[in-house]
Image (spheres, helix red, strand yellow):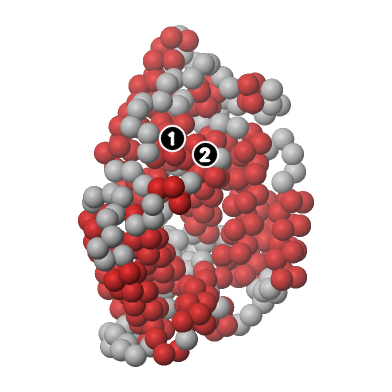
Amino acid sequence: MKHSKSLDELLADERQCPEEISPKRDLWPGIEKAINQEQQKSPKGLSINSKIAFSSAASVLAAVLLIKGPDLLPSQEPTIDSGIAALVNTYEQEKQQMLVRYQGQEAIVSNWQQQLNDLEEAAKSLRNALEDDPDNAVLIHMLGNVYQQQLDLINKVHTPKWQQI
Amino acid sequence: MSAVVQAYAGEDPDSSLVDLAADGDSQAFKQLYERHYRRVYALCLRMTANSESAEECTQEAFIKAWRKLDSFNKQSRFSTWLHTLASRTTLDYLRKHKSWLKLVFSQEDEAVPEPQSASLEQDSIELSSLDKLLCRLPERARIVFTLHGVEGYRHVEIAEMLGISSGASRAQYHRARNLLQEWLNHEA
């Protein structure tokens, strides 16, 4: 090492901070084996429309709807895609049911409602973004995640500590 | 430039291979692997400071990439998307291996470890002097330094990934810088 160089100079030096490092073994066989198994389970090569339909977020939606049934699709938000509205409605109903269930039960952390509000704000931002870009699978997936985090939070703060071990 | 919000400038050189791989062409995906695995491995190695963990994370990142190619919307380059995926995969790996609690919830500063972990000393991988020092950094500082100082993520992006404040990310970055500079001065 050239000790006269500063940290920034070393970071800019390709020899000191190379973009690429080779692993000591061939990692491809393990990856190939895994993706072959994936292909046997669910072959790729679907059309573009099918890919959108079967995106991860849609899978989340389908799973929830299968469990809860189609009767959970009453009031769809007019401004966003009906599939997304169904996702939102389903999670909102689940959230409200959980909040009712835990009403009067002391939470194990005091600021959980603030955390819930923060997550709701994040969900709101994502819903707004989806109004402009309703086919964005990443946004849909993120929205599902944010709702799931809300449900997990409500559950977690109302579950006695001994049950979390 | 931010690795996450890197502007999409011109044709993505991986675009045609990505299309083929998304349609199930595993040979096209292998070509993508060949193009990118060394960079992904470098990222994983710097984040984990352990060659075997880095190998596992690299493999997992590519397997996840294969699974998620359908959801890659091409708003960024494939390499940018892949690196974000690899970063998150490595953080998940660290979380699964118990260091996550220490990473996120511990209020106490981590102790500076003894020079050079055994796992890297025993490896046949040749690391630069700087990378050897980087691997000596405490875990949180090392991860933040790798993501910001090497990979170019913004602190707000790192904060979101780690579930910490951007101020905490900055603090870890400066801690890492100070330690690295101190070690460099000492070696000089």
User: Is B178 located above or below residue B188 in the figure?
Assistant: below
Frontmost residue, A28 versus A71: A71
Looking at the picture, which amino acid does disc 2 mark? Lys
User: Is A78 located above or below residue A23 in the figure?
Assistant: below
CA separation in Å, label 1 and label 2: 8 Å
Q: Which residue is mark 2?
A: B98
Looking at the picture, which amino acid does disc 1 mark? Lys
Q: x and y percent of residue A154 in the render?
A: 34, 61
Residue at position x 33%, y 38% in the image? B169
User: Is A7 located above or below residue A43 in the figure?
Assistant: above
Q: Which residue is mark 1?
A: B102
User: Is A69 located above or below residue B93 in the figure?
Assistant: below
Marks 1 and 2 on same chain: yes
Q: Is residue B131 left or right of residue B178?
A: right
Q: x and y percent of residue B39 in the render?
A: 58, 43
Question: For the residue carrying disc 2, how many other residues have a C-alpha within 10 Å: few (<14), some (14-19), or many (20+)?
Answer: few
Pointers 1 and 2 in contact (C-beta within 8 Å): yes
Q: Chain of mark 2?
A: B
